[in-house]
Image: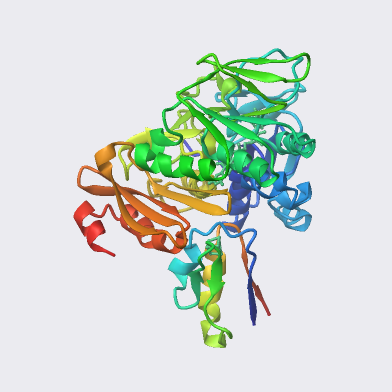
Amino acid sequence: MEITVDPDKCCGYGDCVLTAPELFDLGGDGVAVLLVEEVREDQRADVEAAAASCPVAAIVVHG
Amino acid sequence: MAERPRLRRVAIVGASLAGITAAESLRARGFRGDITMLGAERHRPYDRPPLSKHLLSGGWAADRTQLRSTEALAGLDLEWRLGQPAVWLDPVARDITLADGSTLGYDAALLCTGTTARQIPHPAQLSGVHTLRTLDDALAIRTALDRSPRVAVVGGGFIGAEVAAEARRRGLSVTMVEALPVPMSRGLGQRMGQLCADLHLRHGVDVRCGVTVRAFEGDRRLQRVLLSDGATVDADLAVVGIGSVPATDWLSGSGIELDDGVVCDPFCRTSAPGVYAAGDVARWHNGLFGVRARIEHWTNAREQAIAAVGTMLADYGAGDAPAPYSPVPYVWSDQYGSRIQVAGRPSPHADAVRVIHRDDATDATVAVYRDGDTLVGALAVNAPKLLLPYRRMIAARTRWEDALAVR
Ligand SMILES: Cc1cc2nc3c(=O)[nH]c(=O)nc-3n(C[C@H](O)[C@H](O)[C@H](O)COP(=O)(O)OP(=O)(O)OC[C@H]3O[C@@H](n4cnc5c(N)ncnc54)[C@H](O)[C@@H]3O)c2cc1C
Ligand code: SF4
């Protein structure tokens, strides 16, 4: 599974961080960053919840 | 009790952020009936924040501002009436009249017509004076910027600030005219307003505060701006960002209660049965802060549209009873590479603000605001991460002292 965050879309309010703090954080530039290199299959529900929480659909889960 | 009408036809007036979010939310919650999107502009829903950011800079082409792809829109199965405004709503007959005279019946209607930019009267034949609300406005300003004009920005709010920043990025000379003694001070207070003003000063903007525009002058094209203190500013392009006016003219006389916007109850219902409102145009009592206000920010347009749809479906027996809509307002702005974020309702009073973080190396600042002994707002400059906990604390009506104790 590959996760991307579109930095141009991200408005930096951190809904994803509040939803899945173990997976997302806000970088210094106010864009969400993925904290882990590899998202494990057992984290799929969390990452999908974070993607769904994003108001601008900046987080895309591939695969 | 009268039998509840069935919900078969929903009319959404205003095909922008609140409107498309509502349509998506209706479909996501299983509504299979007709949804008609009415839009005064000829464009499919597009996003406004990039207009004064990526679009003005030329980094984005116009089609990148589209809120949803063509495929995503097709999947929603909507009826579109774009390019002509609604001119009348009859809440008794439950129909809406469009500019071409056609009418559209509805069972429920959502009003999300947003706002229009407040104008400064000037001779109609004088070119070079712009406001920035629509995609067409932004494209016209970009074209004007490409001609390397001398720029006057009227109004030191977020939109004026972003235009000034872009003009400076292009190396153009910029004068900012602000009626208040300090830009943004009505919302953020003097001290934090000054922080915003310093951004402009550091980037070479000529900031004139405490003055207003008396007239725009020129021979067909703008040549100069006359100010209330008698000064003259030479300019070929003026961008006026002095606030906005709710787009409710078309509703006056309809019987729907208006008062600086469409008046709603805490569930997004207007005074007319079956008619709801959301986004920049809606004014309601936010129980979290105990104030009646509109919120003219992106996040609210989206969240309120979802809330309004929840109420609509519940009113027609197709969903659970809604909760009162009482969000923490949020807005962001990008200027000179700095990101400014405001959560909650900052108070302009001098004793209401406390700077709790300052880092010169990263030019980061976080300030919090109180109302009595409750935390009500937070401002972050270049510190998005530090804002997060305060967002939660504002929603929880955290006591001021407890909020200050968290570091
Ligand atoms: C240049 C700019 C930059 C911004 N930047 C930010 C930012 O950085 N952060 C932030 O939080 N917010 C920002 N905002 C505010 C944000 O874009 C708005 O809060 C948001 O667009 C509100 O959405 P809305 O759907 O309520 O209304 P709008 O987006 O205003 O849409 C209303 C729509 O209704 C249509 N309409 C009006 N009257 C009628 C009628 N009678 N019949 C049919 N259609 C009608 C209009 O044409 C318009 O398309 C910015 C706004 C602008 C203009
Ligand atoms: S929820 Fe979306 S917009 Fe918000 S910080 Fe996360 S990625 Fe960015």
B127 lies above or below B33: above
Q: Nearer the viewer, residue B235 or B155?
A: B235
Q: Nearer the viewer, residue B240 or B246?
A: B240
Q: Is residue B315 left or right of residue B288?
A: right
Residue B228 location (% of width, % of height)? 52, 15
Residue B351 location (% of width, % of height)? 24, 40
User: Is any part of residue B278 visible from this angle?
Assistant: no
B357 lies above or below B154: below
Q: Nearer the viewer, residue B54 or B117?
A: B54
User: Is any part of residue B14 visible from this angle?
Assistant: yes
Q: Is residue B18 left or right of residue B400?
A: right
Residue sitting at x 48%, y 57%: B382
Quarter of the figure with residue B386? bottom left
Quarter of the figure with residue B253? top right
Residue B258 location (% of width, % of height)? 47, 23
Q: Quadrant of the C terminus of chain B?
A: bottom left
Residue B147 location (% of width, % of height)? 80, 35
Q: Quadrant of the N terminus of chain B?
A: top left
